[in-house]
Amino acid sequence: MNRLLVRITPLISIAFCVPSVAQQLTPQPFLTPPRLAENAPGGRQLAAAVLPGGCKPEGDITRDGNIVRLHLVAEVAPNQINNPSYPDGAKDNVKLRSYGGCLTGPAVEVKPGNTLRVFLDNNLDTNDPSCKPDAPPGPGCFNTVNLHYHGLHVSPTGNSDNVLLNIGPHTKFEYEVNIPTDHPSGTFWYHPHRHGSTALQVASGASGALIVRGNRPYVGGAPGDIDTILHDAKGASIPEQIFLFQQIPYACFDSNGKIIQNPDGTWKCPAGQTGVVEDFGQQLASATVWDTNGRFTSINGAVEPTLSGIRAGEVQRWRFIHAGIHDTVNLQIVPMVNTGPKAALALRGILSGTPKQQEETVKELCPVLTPDGSKAVALIPQFEIASDGLTHSAITPIGVNQKSISGGIGSNFLQPGYRSDVLIAFPHAGTYCVLNQAATPAERTNAGGGGQGPNVTQLLATVIVSGGTPVTGDMGDYIKRTLYEGNKNNKALPKAALDGLLSGNLTPWRGMPEEGPASNSDHPRSVAFFIGNIPDPQDPQKKVFGFWLNKQEYNPDRVDFTLQVGATEDWVLTSAGEPHIYHIHVNPFEVMDVTHDGKSIFGPHGECLVPPDSVGLQNQYCSMWHTFKDTVFVQNDYEVHVRSTYERYIGEFVMHCHILDHEDSGMMANVLIVPDVAAPGGGLGMPGMKGMSNRTMNHAHNQH
Ligand SMILES: [Cu+2]
């Protein structure tokens, strides 16, 4: 189907615990996400869905005009995950819940104006001891699912992007998601979102890329699709890669139900045992679990794959999707300086030893400091064209603060839920490392305690660049010039738009127009996250522990915010004690400002000022000035000011912390958008009608 996406190494390997000699010599291939078998109208099957080294997912896809029919199966399936700590390239056996039975859900591509009919088949076991009748909201019912179309601007109600549905085991459900014709094209994703089972299922690999690809050219007037101008200097479409990052905390258990560990505390699956994700308390509910368990962030289901077949100077679009549940990925790309035996093993996804020993190897192969330790090496720069699927108004270099090692130029802070589309080109042939850089102690959210990327630097992937034409000089200028050359012969493209590419101006293709004035600028709505003890509303003498959003835990029967469709409003997002990650469904928001101690971190034109504190974490906000997002990191002691217009859709949906175990533990709120907030009946015009109108009337006073 999409030729552009298929640029994988032509090597078929894996699937055996003990690699053969031939396999030992070959790099571990970078896998593109699995593809569903594609049916032509009339029943003929067009293409096999299996890719080299990949997994054939259950289900299929049929396109008939604007209707896209998708059969998706939620099931438990056996798989294998590469474990870099094994010196022989062995893999761990796992058995996980996912879509289609592969380690990552199939990539799904749609167009603006499509109707996506998803026939979701919940094939999980009806025997679910985690699901207790009448249990209060919270972690549990791990075999009950639903589906969220993260970032899509679609209806949140009925059979559409409705995360308030429970789809029980051995139940089929048909979704109908109408993607409006004016929907931005970009990188989105799908995952289960049933309160209580979201974290465990996403942590098992139940997520997939959802690409909206547009073919609307910019000819003056309405913005066009960025997809129409991503051309190389010869005018051909540039290659692209999906990177779906997952953090799968699989573990094996002893007869007492405790996780089996190595002497250093990392998790161990002895021979013959199969890793699972079943225990919310031990495997998910801890700020430090991902730092200490020795597991690795995977890419499209593979740990430390090697991407090859890229040429020097070749501009590529990389679509990063953070589908992990808890921890920052601090993505840096650096040259590999060592070509010895350790490098050859690294290309096979073998580093050997404890996490600390593996970090030593990574630092030896891919240093981010000069040999004398005095200076950061130049990272391969990433030029962001879209965040959270929404094209920027300018090509934006990632990272600006050279003083910081982990936040220096080219360091892409990806938080759970984020997408980042970057243009990238490698300056010359060679091997490169894609790192998940550990934050320096000063940059950790809980110094020494975890929660901000891994404790140790991890290798995410290696990249082999061969052939092509080396690039000297400024890479940003080179990439802009390439786009300019690639669109020069497009006579329909207005000259001002073409010339603008030379300075990185993407306004003609931006995903969202600038927000207008907000009706509540002097009294913005607020969202405050906090985990800990607060006075018990029933008995103020007592304290009660919880995962709080505005001092309330999630109650599916309570509406927390009632909003007027069409209104534009300001919100202030804060976290106390530790950072959280704000995500709201249906409508994206524009990041208007980020403040610390009441002072903006931005200058008058959005330039990122010298950090107002020594922590450095605010670096990740530097490229967010007036960008649109649907998910944003909320650093404690900072205020993130956002503005959103509640366009088009009415109905009930959620906002929540995208650290998904926090969400399942209560950090979520219901949002209801109504046609007329002042009308009798709370906006639906029928006072006394059961359902949303009653709820609106009863809970209007709960607005914050
Ligand atoms: Cu949180």
Image (cartoon, grey):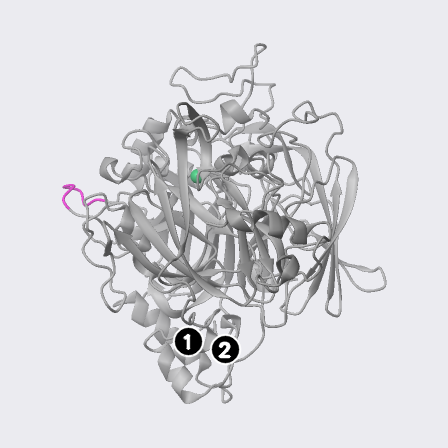
> What residue does disc 1 label?
507
Which circle marks residue 223 in the picture? 2
> x and y percent of residue 237 in the render?
52, 71
What residue is shown at x 40% (from left), y 44% (from top)? 528
Residue farthest right in this picture: 42
Pick the quarter of the image with the N terminus. Answer: bottom right
- Magenta includes 1? no
> x and y percent of residue 653 in the render?
59, 51
Which circle marks residue 456 in the picture? none
**Left or right: 27 as drawn, with respect to 558:** left
Task: In this rendered view, identify the residue nearer to me: 175 or 541.
Answer: 541
Asked which quadrant contains residue 440, the reply is top left
**Left or right: 576 as drawn, with respect to 57:** left
- Magenta includes 373? yes
Cβ atoms under marks 1 and 2 closer than 8 Å:
yes
Task: In this rendered view, identify the residue nearer to me: 324 or 137.
Answer: 137
The Cα atoms of the two marked residues, 1 and 2, are separated by 8 Å
**Left or right: 564 as drawn, with respect to 497:** right
Q: Main secondary structure of the magenta part?
A: loop
| Magenta stretch in the rendered image | 369-374
> x and y percent of residue 478 in the render?
33, 71
Q: Amino acid at mark 1?
A: Thr
What residue is shown at x 27% (from left), y 45% (from top)? 406
Asked which quadrant contains residue 198, the reply is top right
What residue is shown at x 63% (from left), y 72% (from top)? 181
Asked which quadrant contains residue 262, the reply is top left
